[in-house]
């Protein structure tokens, strides 16, 4: 038996879920005939794209079990929270929301409430739910997501809280139904889990070890998406640069990216996230050569001092990071760069923090995702001591935002007066009269136009810029 066959889930397991889907569907169809009302579900998703992608799978299973979807908790028959635990505030929000549902459940006893995702992979959280949130009907983790049909069926029939959490590494499960969020852009997970154990991070504990999908499964999913008319594909993984390390076949992420680029009809490809320690010259070269790979790189550096990087167990230095950036800019001059940064890591001094500001000024990122350090139970950093007070951390955080906002605006100003290729995504949420889309470099751009443009590539002349987006005019020489 090959390594792969051991990791991919046995077919009998999948068939068991298919049977559960059929039984729940039958029950829901029967209820619907009696009441004349379709069953409605709502999934509330926190966290990263991995979780968004998982929610698309949950939605796929729900659709096959006869559910439609609603945005309104009051009219829902099933409310599911797909949770994140990367920072404490994500967890607090979930507890607040679940607590608030107690009254709704008391008024509507047939309402089913479920909680799943990363938070549920932590024992102390499941214990807390069992004790304090008895109105929850089902709890399941990231590794048992594929068993949702069985779990739901049990929850429909039992009065107690059904719990299905597995602590060992998950399998790779192909063939879970999917109901995607949109029709223009799609996420494709190429691997699951993380092996890096950055000292602050909970992800390796709740997502398990790295498991790469078989390249042929990735290619077939992308080909299918292209055939369905999707225009932009984002390849997902916690650290895509280590794709393939666990596969028998001699393949790395650069090879996979090249293979996806070569799929007939593919238009735009993005990927995230890259870890600086694993980024190769080969990958930079493939990014440069491949026509459909967008000029964009998200490369988290987290902190700008070597002392803090070592405490974080990041396995690169600020010099190595800057060297990678230099190479990327040289190979792809119009590349847009983004990064993740943690402010206030234990042990970080004001001098260390100056190192972070220095990198930001040197690199001039297009935008940043910035976080104040949040201690996570069970991680090594939880036991490390702070040098700076909460107030000092907050002041540094604000300083960083102010500097970055100026840089983001300056970067956007370079687009003024230029024609850019835009993939039109839909109407703008903040400005519903306008359409919105993204440039190849990932910039949000708003402009006037009619509905037929959604899902097409057009030329937009950039006429105005803001810190977070561009505004333009559709110019007719379409692409
Ligand atoms: N695998 C990705 C992203 C993981 S989580 C990567 O390595 O880049 C997304 C971001 O959340 C991280 O990059 C980090 O900046 C932030 N993060 C993770 N744990 C955190 C913590 N305990 N406190 C604050 N920010 C954290
Ligand atoms: Fe967390 Fe580090 Fe893994 Fe990213 S690479 S998920 S930050 S442990
Ligand atoms: Fe959060 Fe889990 Fe993603 S902890 S950031 S949802 S992998």
Image (cartoon, rainbow, N blue to C red):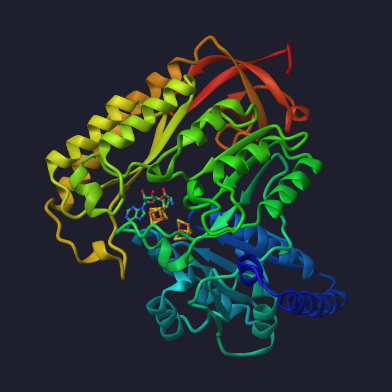
Let me know if residue 180 appears in the view. Answer: no
Q: Residue 287, relative to residue 20: is it above or below?
A: above
Q: Position of residue 326 (x, y in %)?
A: 37, 25
**Left or right position of 377 against 424:** left
Q: Residue 5, relative to residue 355: is it above or below?
A: below
Q: Which quarter is ligand 2 in?
A: bottom left
Residue toward you, 382 or 265: 265
Seen as rendered, the residue at the extreme top is 417
**Left or right position of 317 against 37:** left
Residue in the image at 55% along x and 35% along y: 430
Q: How many marks?
A: 0
Residue in the image at 31% along x and 50% along y: 314
Q: Position of residue 101 (x, y in %)?
A: 52, 72
Q: Position of residue 281 (x, y in %)?
A: 46, 33
The quadrant of the image that shows the N terminus is bottom right
Seen as rendered, the residue at the extreme right is 33
**Left or right position of 269 against 194:** right
Quadrant housing residue 54:
bottom right
Q: Residue 139, relative to residue 408: is it above or below?
A: below
Q: Position of residue 153 (x, y in %)?
A: 70, 82
Seen as rendered, the residue at the extreme bottom is 159
Let me know if residue 1 appears in the view. Answer: yes
Residue toward you, 366 or 168: 168
Residue in the image at 54% along x and 68% along y: 142
Quadrant housing residue 323:
top left
Residue in the image at 12% along x and 39% along y: 351
The quadrant of the image that shows the C terminus is top right
Q: Residue 129, relative to residue 231: is it above or below?
A: below
């Amino acid at each position: 038996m090959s390594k792969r066959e051991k990791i991919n889930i046995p077919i009998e397991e999948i068939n068991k879920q298919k049977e559960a889907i059929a039984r729940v569907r039958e029950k829901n169809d029967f209820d619907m005939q009696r009441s004349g009302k379709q069953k409605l579900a709502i999934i509330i998703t926190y966290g990263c794209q991995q979780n968004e992608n998982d929610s698309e799978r949950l939605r796929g299973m729900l659709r096959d079990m006869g559910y439609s979807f609603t945005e309104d908790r009051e009219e829902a028959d099933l409310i599911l929270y797909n949770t994140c635990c990367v920072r404490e505030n994500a967890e607090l929000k979930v507890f607040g929301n679940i607590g608030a549902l107690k009254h709704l459940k008391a008024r509507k006893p047939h309402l089913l409430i479920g909680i799943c995702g990363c938070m549920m992979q932590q024992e102390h959280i499941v214990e807390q739910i069992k004790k304090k949130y008895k109105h929850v009907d089902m709890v399941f983790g990231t590794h048992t997501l594929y068993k949702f049909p069985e779990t739901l069926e049990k929850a429909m029939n039992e009065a107690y809280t059904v719990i299905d959490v597995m602590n060992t590494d998950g399998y790779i499960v192909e063939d879970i139904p999917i109901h995607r969020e949109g029709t223009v852009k799609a996420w494709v997970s190429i691997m699951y889990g993380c092996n890096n154990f950055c000292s602050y991070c909970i992800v390796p504990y709740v997502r398990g070890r790295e498991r790469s999908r078989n390249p042929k499964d990735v290619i077939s999913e992308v080909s299918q998406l292209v055939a369905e008319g999707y225009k932009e594909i984002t390849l997902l993984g916690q650290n895509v640069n280590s794709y393939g390390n666990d596969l028998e076949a001699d393949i790395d992420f650069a090879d996979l990216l090249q293979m996806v680029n070569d799929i007939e009809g593919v238009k735009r490809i993005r990927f995230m996230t890259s870890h600086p320690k694993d980024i190769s010259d080969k990958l930079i070269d493939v990014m440069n050569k491949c026509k459909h790979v967008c000029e964009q790189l998200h490369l988290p550096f987290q902190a700008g001092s070597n002392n803090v990087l070592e405490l974080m167990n990041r396995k690169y230095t600020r010099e190595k990071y800057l060297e990678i950036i230099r190479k990327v800019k040289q190979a792809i001059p119009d590349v847009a760069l983004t990064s993740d940064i943690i402010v206030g890591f234990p042990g970080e001094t004001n001098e260390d923090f100056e190192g972070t500001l220095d990198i930001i000024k040197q690199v001039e990122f297009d935008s940043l995702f910035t976080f104040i350090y949040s201690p996570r139970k069970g991680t090594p950093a939880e036991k490390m001591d702070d040098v700076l007070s909460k107030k000092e951390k907050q002041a540094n955080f604000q300083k960083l935002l102010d500097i970055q906002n100026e840089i983001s605006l300056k970067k956007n100003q370079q687009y003024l007066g230029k024609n850019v290729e835009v993939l039109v995504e839909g109407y703008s949420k903040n400005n519903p009269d306008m359409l919105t889309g993204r440039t190849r470099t990932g910039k949000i751009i708003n402009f006037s136009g009619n509905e037929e443009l959604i899902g097409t590539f057009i030329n937009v002349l950039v006429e105005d810029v803001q810190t977070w987006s561009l505004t333009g005019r559709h110019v007719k020489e379409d692409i």
